[in-house]
Amino acid sequence: MAKLPIVTLPDPILRKLSTPVERIDDELRQLADDMLETMYAAPGVGLAAIQVGVPRRLVVLDVADEDEPRQPLVMFNPEIVALGSQTRLHEEGCLSIPDFRIEIERPSSLMLRYIDREGEPREMDAEGLLATAVQHEINHLDGKLIIDFLSPLKRDMVVRKFRKQARATT
Ligand code: NI
């Protein structure tokens, strides 16, 4: 397994729409494993393929507590089938937007469909942190970022800050 470099703001690839995976082969399984290693090292609870520069519909997640055994999830073509009516507020961060956090209100439960690492179709109910993380990662596949929950003015301020940082380090 290998740790991959994470793409950060303002890289325009983060706005790309990711395309569905048609066949899960060894190369995609390797990518998923590398993404898990990258996510654990960061550390983070979720990572979308686009965040390592690959515009395919693949996300990895693990919302287990630090003192619990790992519960890695690999999801190809994840799709939300139904959203619950209750919401939960969570302060979210994003590995592509270092040192930025924002409270976002999202549905607190959902039902989703995806294809697992072995290529098997799965259905899953998610709630709490997992429901939040799934929605955050699926947003990535559609080119949507947590800064989009800000007002346009505040969003521009954050993007400008990252642009300046990127210029300063290159
Ligand atoms: Ni993110």
Image (spheres, rainbow, N blue to C red):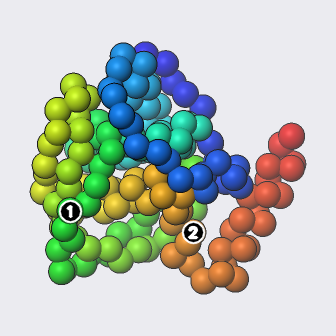
Tell how many labels.
2
- Depth check: give the residue in front, 120 or 136: 120
Residue occupying the point 53% across, 42% down:
55
Q: Nearer the viewer, residue 76 or 101?
A: 76
x, y percent for residue 138 = 39, 55
Q: Quadrant of residue 156?
A: bottom right
For mark 1, what is the residue? 81
Which residue occupies 40% across, 43% down? 20
Residue in the picture at 64% in, 48% down = 13
Asked whether residue 70 appears in the rendered view, the answer is no
Q: Position of residue 131 (x, y in %)?
A: 25, 60
Q: Earlier in the sequence, mark 2 or mark 1?
A: 1
Left or right, 104 with respect to 9, comes to left
Quadrant where the C terminus sits is top right
Image side of residue 155 versus residue 66, left or right: right
Question: What residue sits 21% from the left and 71% below the top?
Answer: 83
Instruction: Point out which mark residue 133 bears.
Output: none
Name the amino acid, label 2: Ile
Residue at far front of view: 22
- Real-space CA distance between mark 2 and mark 1, rounded to the nearest whole angstrom: 25 Å
Q: Looking at the picture, how far across and down is residue 32, in whole percent?
A: 38, 29
Q: In which quadrant of the rendered image does the N terminus lie?
A: top left
**Picture layout, residue 88 above or below residue 51:** below
From this view, report whether residue 142 is shown above or below residue 41: below
The residue wearing badge 2 is: 147
| The residue at label 2 has a CB less than 8 Å from ligand 1 | no
Q: Do the CB atoms of the residues marked 2 and 1 lie less than 8 Å apart?
A: no
Indicate left or right for 48 with 130 as reference. right
Q: Secondary structure at mark 2?
A: helix
Task: Count neighbours of disc 2 (C-alpha within 10 A) and say few if under 14, some if 14 to 19, many if 20 or more.
Answer: some
Amino acid type, callout 1:
Val
Which mark is in front, 2 or 1? 1
